[in-house]
Image: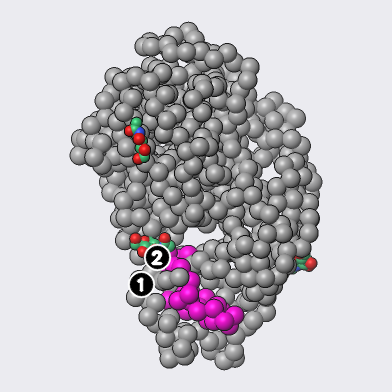
Amino acid sequence: MRIMHSHWLFGLLSTSTGILGTPLVYDTTTGERDTTFIVKHSWSGTPKGWRLHSEPTSDHMLKFHIGLKQGGIDEVIRHLYEVSDPAHIRYGQHLSKEEVDELISPTEETTATVSEWLQSHGIHYSDCYASSAGDWLQLTVPISKAETMFNTQYHIFQHEKTGEYTLRSLNWSLPSYVHSHIDVAAPTTSFTRTRSMKKTSFLDPHVPMIDDLSGGLSTSCSTSVTPSCLRTLYNTANYTPTATNVNQIGIAGYLEEFANFADLKTFMQKFRSDAVNANFTVTLINGGANNQAQPGIEANLDTQYAGAMTFPTPNIYYSTGGSPPFIPDDNTPTNTNEPYLDWLNFISNQTTIPQTFSTSYGDDEQTVPEDFAVRVCNGFAQLGVMGSSVLFSSGDDGVGAGECLANDGSDTIRFQPNFPASCPYVTTVGATVKTNPEQATSFSGGGFSNYFAQPSYQASAVLAFLTELGTTNQGLFNASSRAYPDVAAQGQSFQVVIGGATGSVSGTSASCPTFAGVITLLNDFRLSNNKPSLGFLNPLIYANPSAFNDITKGNNQGCGTNGFSAGIGWDPVTGLGTPDFLKLQTLLG
Ligand SMILES: *[C@@H]1O[C@H](CO)[C@@H](O)[C@H](O)[C@H]1NC(C)=O
Ligand SMILES: *[C@@H]1O[C@H](CO)[C@@H](O)[C@H](O)[C@H]1NC(C)=O
Ligand SMILES: *[C@@H]1O[C@H](CO)[C@@H](O)[C@H](O)[C@H]1NC(C)=O
Ligand SMILES: *[C@@H]1O[C@H](CO)[C@@H](O)[C@H](O)[C@H]1NC(C)=O
């Protein structure tokens, strides 16, 4: 284990040997620490869908992420809105990693107090991995110690439907004196299913498989989607990328999903023969693997469509480990099942990062504690302010799957938004089907967050929708919060090569790399004209709805309702609509 640089670390090392730091860290009135535990987060009962299974052994080792309170995250958000607003004088003036690190670095008081708290449990700050900004620490401790540190008990829970296990607590607390200096600790109370963190794609067995249809928008694009359908529909077919020495797209992969090289080649031979030399590189994060004997549906879908939309732009596939099946009686140091954090911590520690990211994973927002969701969402804002566009699938359950009972102990029915789709600093992509005209798929995830307030960039678009909606679905969602999706793209019956065979895959998983592919080409256009990348997209796209094909048909049923309906203007089914590359290019020229 090792630490990162940073000026204050030297102070800390001294603190732990007792040379420095006392004035910073002791209460001036009493001269003593207030060590009363105060709850950070607590569930009122076992979260919906899980049951208590058994107790873990107390010497089981757990890897923790501790999120120290960031110094100037509000400043980061202020910068984000300025540099992402096309009407602002600072549009496109993204911050460097060093500038972001400087803003988010915890205050010396925060670092010293956290260090003292760790020390009180026999842990040296210097034995933890710190992020370059010092805002995240990683440490591995036995469960017994974690239970003392967080005044809680860990239990093994089993998911009722899938049978998978997770190791979590129902609440966690911190001593009063350190309470405000730590935002999150994981794993604690987040029940996001990472092993099956909803993989938003599914093999669609009902659609006949169709071979190549070269050129033009074939009528078959209504029932079977290939790269040529998408490149024609969204007007990218005649654009050839040139900024391939600087521009990149990153595809996030989790859950032991491996993207296959040979399948990509077969796919290109079949569906985009001018791109048979397309390839991607694989970056392994947190013990992620690259098993070419085990092609994943999601991974192949993402890499094949991102590649076909963006060739010859470099594609990076991130294989993030940390979510193998958790085995209750296995004593090996365990995965923490928090792979978003491992991915974010890895990406935020890089000096250069791709200008576009596509992620096709998510889960119900209510499985994630609010403070945890806020902290992860702020991590995406950090990528945006550095000039990257962060895109997520909106989910495949319309307004919510199953009974849609709220987790807050009230047992009331509420629409179930998805996270990270509901984060205001990402661009969320819903799904369409058919052509002339395209319409919403019934599964397209959409709705309103229960955590995040409505950002101003979408206020007038959402208000117009709500005015038209009237009292429909009243009480099932919060009309004053972040609404999504922002945009949409085709998402049904994508032809994908898996293990050499062609199959048909549907889901907003297909929509996300497609839309991200269009953004990657726009970034290419910007960069090849010596302009900065697009970065956080939402203020730009809500200011220019006419650059999208408005989708006005279809609805996203769920929770025993018809969900919301697509209509003129923005709607929580297809957002502003599907992209028109030529219009967007004109806008950004
Ligand atoms: C951050 O990057 C530095 C330099 O590449 C590396 O030494 C360090 O281990 C990284 N830290 C984390 C937490 O990934
Ligand atoms: C925390 O959860 C445990 C069960 O794991 C329970 O016994 C305890 O009362 C809870 N504490 C708080 C503060 O909610
Ligand atoms: C793609 O890259 C992988 C890993 O670098 C390599 O093994 C494979 O041969 C490449 N495929 C093509 C078609 O270049
Ligand atoms: C609705 O969302 C707003 C903005 O986040 C929040 O202030 C309000 O408390 C929420 N209302 C309910 C009933 O949850």
Image location of residue 336, percent across then percent down: 59, 58
> Regarding mark 1 in the picture, which secondary structure is present there?
loop
Write down the region rendered in magenta: 108-136
Viewer-closest of 577 and 389: 389
Viewer-closest of 292 and 376: 292
Residue appearing at x 78%, y 59% in the figure? 54
Viewer-closest of 564 and 328: 328
Residue 525 appears anywhere in the view: yes
Classify mark 1: residues with Cα within 10 Å, few (<14), some (14-19) or many (20+).
some
- Asked if the residue under mark 1 is in contact with the one under mark 2, i.e. CB atoms within 8 Å, the reply is yes
Residue that carries the numbered disc 2 in the rendered image: 133
Between disc 2 and disc 1, whose residue precedes?
1
Image location of residue 448, percent across then percent down: 60, 40
Q: Tell me how the rendering is colored.
A: one colour
- Amino acid under disc 2: Ala
Residue that carries the numbered disc 1 in the rendered image: 6
Please identify the quarter of the rendering in which residue 32 is found: bottom right
In the rendered view of the protein, which quadrant contains the N terminus? bottom left
Image location of residue 136, percent across then percent down: 48, 64
